[in-house]
Image: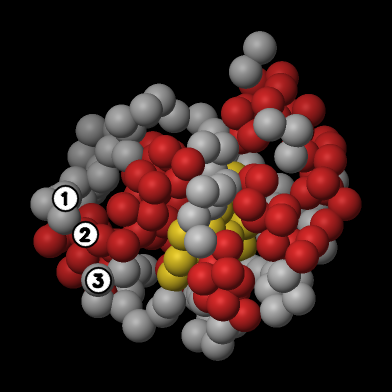
Amino acid sequence: PQHPGEDTSFASLTNLVNENTLKAIKEMGFTNMTEIQHRSIRPLLEGRDLLAAAKTGSGKTLAFLIPKLKFMPRNRTGALILSPTRELAMQTFGVLKELMTHHIHTYGLIMGGSNRSAEAQKLANCINIIVATPGRLLDHMQNTPGFMYKNLQCLVIDEADRILDVGFEEELNQRSKWKRACLAHFAPRRIGFPSLLEAIQGSIK
């Protein structure tokens, strides 16, 4: 919980977050952080790993999007945000689009039901930030030669308990050689993916 007297304003992040990000946040109408944002953003900006749980409407999407922008390379795919459903992927992409208003990085939405060839072209061009659903992501990982995902700096798995339901964990474990493995928001990179899954399963019982 937040402690009385703590500065929870986004302005308090001025020396930590890019000014273009803060400008977009202000234009989105936000001045103060929610609890999950206040407790998550600073540790993530420090490069620490974090497993977090938050209710719908708590502001968790911004909590993982804001820190992620700090670690963005300009000429390759640097971050992947995995969503369990098309609906959640579109919601996350909508928030990302607003947050990226003043940034030059590229970003795209990869999900079932969309034009696959257009997606493949985006991936071949190494878009910087990807929001994806599991099935379509695996399709591109297996069948799109130009998709260079091995240099990812950050993986965000939103609603990780639902990801378990779609049977994605085994495939991801086989392919994950990324610098950071993230569950819910960001999770420890020093342990294997199965151990992370066990931690999540234990936390949602």
Mark closer to the chain start, 1 or 2: 2
**Image vertical order of residue 9 relative to residue 117, above or below:** above
Contact between labelled residues 2 and 1, with CB atoms less than 8 Å apart = yes
Numbered disc 2: secondary structure: helix
Residue 2 in view, yes or no: no
- Place of residue 154 in the rendered image (x, y in percent of width and height, measured from the top left): 61, 62
**Image vertical order of residue 51 relative to residue 182, above or below:** above
Mark closer to the chain start, 3 or 2: 2
Amino acid carrying label 2: it is Ile
41 or 58: which is nearer to us?
58
Query: In 3D space, how far apart are the residues under numbered discs 3 and 2 (Cα atoms)?
Result: 10 Å
At horizontal 38% and vertical 54% (from top left) the residue drawn is 93
Q: Mark 1 points at which residue?
A: 30
| Mark 1 crowdedness (10 Å alpha carbons): few <14, some 14-19, many ≥20 | few
Contact between labelled residues 2 and 3, with CB atoms less than 8 Å apart = no
Query: Farthest residue toward the top?
Result: 205
Q: Name the residue under label 2.
A: 25
| Mark 2 crowdedness (10 Å alpha carbons): few <14, some 14-19, many ≥20 | many
Contact between labelled residues 3 and 1, with CB atoms less than 8 Å apart = no
At horizontal 49% and vertical 55% (from top left) the residue drawn is 114
Q: Seen in the image, is 84 located left or right of residue 21? A: right
- Place of residue 52 in the rendered image (x, y in percent of width and height, measured from the top left): 53, 36
Q: Name the residue under label 3.
A: 101
Q: Seen in the image, is 24 located left or right of residue 129? A: left
